[in-house]
Image (cartoon, rainbow, N blue to C red):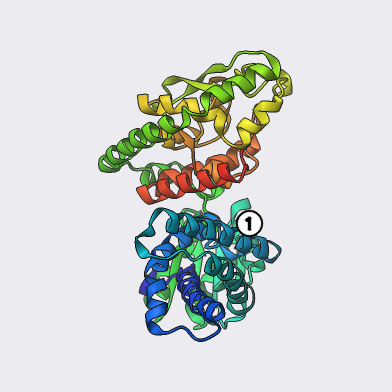
Amino acid sequence: MIHENMTLVPKREYLLLLVGDIAIFVASLWLTLALRYLEPPSIELFMLHLQPFALLFSAWVVVFFLAGLYGRHTRIFRSRLIPTIFYTQIVNMMIAALFFFFVPSFGLSPKTILLLYLAVSFCLIFAWRGMLFIRMPRSKKLKGVLIAHGPDARALAEEIHRDPHATFAFDYVVDTSTAPSHEVIQQACRVAAEEDVTFLVADFSDKAVSAALPIIYDAAFQKNRFALVEASELYQEVFDRVPLSLINYEWVLQNLSASRVYDLIKRLMDIMGALIIGGLSLIAYPFVMMAIKLDDGGQIFITQLRVGRFQKPIRIVKFRSMSGNDMGDYGAGGKSTLTVTRVGRILRMLRIDELPQLWNVLRGDLSLVGPRPELPALAAQYSARIPYYNARYLVSPGLSGWAQLRHDSHPHHGADIVETKAKLSYDLYYLKHRSLLLDLFVILQTIRIALTARGT
C-alpha cells in the first residue's frame, strides 16, 4: 500500500557497504604490493595479482555476510566491530592460503603478501566501516504518523525512536486503544494537510483507523510524495518477525500461501544436503559414540516423538546429550529434571547431537530449514493457548530455522508460553517470506553458528 514506490526501509546502505568493502579489498591489494616491493606496483604486477584475488573477493564477501557485517546497524555494536573484522579477515586469509595451495595454476605463492594484506586490509576496513561510513551524511529523515495499538506497535515506535540510522521518524504516535476516535480523525486530517508529513503507518484492520480511511485515502492521492504503510509490514521490515498483536486469522490465511515449485526444489535440496552432510559426518560417528559411552555409560542414541507437517507424528533420532530422554512431560513445574551431560554440552554447541536427524530429512519427515519440531505434550499446550500456532504445521519442521537463528531465548526442555509466542512470530515470518534464498541464508548462518560453537 505504498504510493510513488516510496520505501521507508531502503537497502541502499547495505549496497553501499558492499561496494565500499570491495573497493577496500582492491585498494588493500594495491597498497600491500606497494609495501612489499617498496614502490608503486606496475599495472602488469597489479593485474597479475588482481585476477586470482578477484575470485577470492566473492568468497570474502560471503564470509562478511556470515559474520553479520551486512546486518542492521542497530545490531552491530561498535565494541564488536574490531574483533569481528579481525576474525573475519583471518578466515579470509586462510581461504586465500588454501586457494593458492590447491590452485597453483596462477603461479603465485604469496605468503608474505598475505600477511601484509591481513594487516593492511584490517586497518582500511576498520577505517571505512568504523570511522568513515558512520559519518557519511544521510538524507533528511521522513516525517510520518503511526496509528495502531498493542505491544508490537509500541515496540516499533520505540525502536525507530532510538535508531540513529533510521531514515524516517514518527512525528506523532496514536495508540488507538486509549486515544478517542476524534484524535485519530484529527491526526488523519493532519496527514492530509501538512506537506512535510510524508507517510502514515497504520493498522488498517483497526476500527478507529477504518473511520478515518476516507481522509487518509484523500491525502494519498493529493500529495506528490506520500506512503500508506501497513503497520505489520513495517514491523516485519524492522524486526524480521511478524507482530502477533497486529495480525488476525484473515492475515494468516492470506499470507501463508504455498508454491509447489518451491516445495519441489526445496525437497531436492534437502535430499542433496542430507546425503552430502550425512555422508561426511559419518567420519565423526565413532568418536561421538565413544565419547558418550565414556562419559556416563548410557545409551548413545535416543528417539523422540515430535509433531511434523500437518500435525502428523514423526519419530526423530538424536545423539543423547542429556541424562535421559526428554519426552516433554514436565508436570506442574513446567521444566525438565534432566541435566545436560559434559559431552552433551559440547555436542549441543557444535550441533553434532542433531546429525542423526539427517536420516529424517532423507525420509521426508524433516527439512533442513523449517520451524522447530515440537514435542507432542508441549505442542498440545501451545496450540490451545497461542493463536495462530498451528500455522507452523503448514511446512515440514526443520533441523534449523529462522526462529532458531533469531530468537535466542526460545524455551528448551520446558513449557514457556511467552517465549513460544515470540518464537512463533519468527516462524510466521519464515512462512510468509520463505524462499530458496532465505533457506540458503539460514543454512549458511547455521554453519557459522556451529563453527563458532554457539549452539544451544
Image spot of residue 390 (x, y percent): 47, 32
Residue pushed farthest left?
261
Q: Residue at x 63, y 43 (%)?
A: 408
Name the residue located 38 percent from the left edge and 63 percent from the top edge.
55
For the C terminus, the image quarter is: top right
Q: Is residue 203 visible?
A: no
Q: Could you say which quadrant of the image residue 275 lies in?
A: top left
Residue 269 is at least partly visible in this image? yes
Vertical arrangement, residue 258 with respect to residue 282, above or below:
below
Residue 364: x, y in percent? 36, 27
Q: Quadrant of residue 323?
A: top right
Dot 1 corresponds to which residue? 155
- Taking the image as shown, residue 260 lies to the left or right of residue 348, namely left
Query: What crowding class fits label 1: few (fewer than 14 Cα within 10 Å), some (14-19), or many (20 or more)?
Result: some
102 sits left or right of 449 in the view: left
Q: Nearer the viewer, residue 276 or 49?
A: 49
Q: Is residue 321 left or right of residue 191?
A: right
Nearest the eye: 69 or 222:
69
SS assignment at label 1: helix
Type of amino acid at the residue the image marks with label 1:
Ala
